[in-house]
Amino acid sequence: MRKTRPALAAAAACLFAVTACSTTEPEAAGGGDSGDIETGSGVTDDTITIGVLTDLSGPFAAGAAVQVTQFQAFWDQVNADGGVCDRDVELQVQDHAYDPQKAVSLYRSMSSDIIALQQVLGGPTSAAVLPLADQDSMYAGGVGWASTALGYESNQLPGASYSIQGANAVDYLVDELGVAEGSSIGVVYFAGDYGADVLAGAQHAAEERGVEIIPQEITPATTDLSAQASALVQDGASAVILGAAPGQLASLAGVLASQGADIPIVGMNPTFNPALLDTPVADALLADTYSILSVAPYASDEPGVRAANELYEAADPDGAIGWEVPLASGQAQLLRTALEGACEAGDLTPEGVVAAMREGADVDTEGLFPDGLDYSTVGESPTRTVYVTKVSDTAEAGLELLETYEGPSAQSYTFG
């Protein structure tokens, strides 16, 4: 176990082959040896347009709104500093409301106007859009953390996959929180790629560590987890891993507390929102609730996180804060690096952005993500290290960073 502490002119000709069409622009900044640069969809002489497909009216709306604010602040700053490849970066933001069919429709409507997708928020929406984006050789970042996304060359996962998070959760429960061999651990999870991936990682780790998994599948429409919590208490669960949303965390923690079940809850990336600490279940959350993150929490002292927080606070002084702030900056930084790499290679097309992203084998984000992210191998998680946090009413944004962590089951997990 490893641990450390705290071009518009060509548009008519490209209507039916957007990603294959390009123009040649003499003496553009960041070109190849000849000083020429090839451009494609989403790129004009003055602008680079990137897309955001997010959830502004569904179960993850609160955190999504924070991320959109931070994306805009990040790219505004980049533009103020000269932009990318002598162009301003513009955002096209669309709300899919956590609906896969709507996400597909929105992607099809925007794909000819963008060079890359900054984000496709959510497991089921990402699963629906990724095959289309990959077919178009369209960079897709911020697609959640489902392992199924790793098989797409155009995808850039922002940190450890959900399966790695789930495996690390079991390892941490056993090695740090005292769950004994032979014990049972409940896994309450959304149906679909998100929850199934959390479950897969937890099941692998359970076999490795000699514990039993009690699975409880739910949907985003399941907001009362009384039945699931009661079943886990009856089955003697020593802990619960949650792959769901903040509303489900509130219900689960509240019901378990009301039944006198003093057991730890370990949530994945999207499960916690600091607004929960202003609800009646705050005490239950503070008692024994943890969150496994692929991105550093808002309270981290790493330079990348401090810079991200300052940028957000200047953009929206009264805005809600959370781990989504460093996440959005991290995602934007990953895409900026890919865009700049494509410019340097003289290929500012969707295909060129994907190729540049895949050149990254040791990516450093100044602590926004674990150091050494590796995107050179399709099908592998870029890291197996996560951040372990605990719900706290004294830490900024409600999550105290305990440590970075990579358990033995996360190390041994293999991707099909």
Image (cartoon, rainbow, N blue to C red):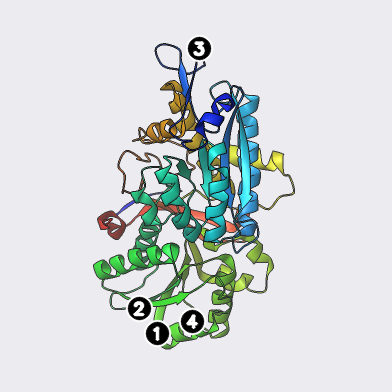
Separation (CA) of disc 4 from disc 1: 12 Å
Q: Taking 208 as reference, is 302 left or right?
A: right
Of labels 3 and 1, earlier in sequence is 3
Per the image, the residue denoted by label 3 is 27
Q: Disc 4, disc 2: CB below 8 Å?
A: no
Residue 324's spot in the image, x, y percent? 57, 50
Q: Residue at x 61, y 48 (%)?
A: 67
Of labels 4 and 1, earlier in sequence is 4
Residue 301's spot in the image, x, y percent? 54, 43
- Please say if 168 is above or below 115: below
The quarter in which the N terminus is drawn is bottom left
Q: Secondary structure at mark 1?
A: loop
Q: Taking 401 as reference, is 201 left or right?
A: left
* Residue 127 visible in the picture: yes
Separation (CA) of disc 4 from disc 2: 14 Å
Q: Amino acid at mark 3?
A: Glu
Q: Disc 3, disc 2: CB below 8 Å?
A: no
Per the image, the residue denoted by label 4 is 228
Residue 184 numbered mark, or none? 2
Q: Disc 2, disc 1: CB below 8 Å?
A: yes
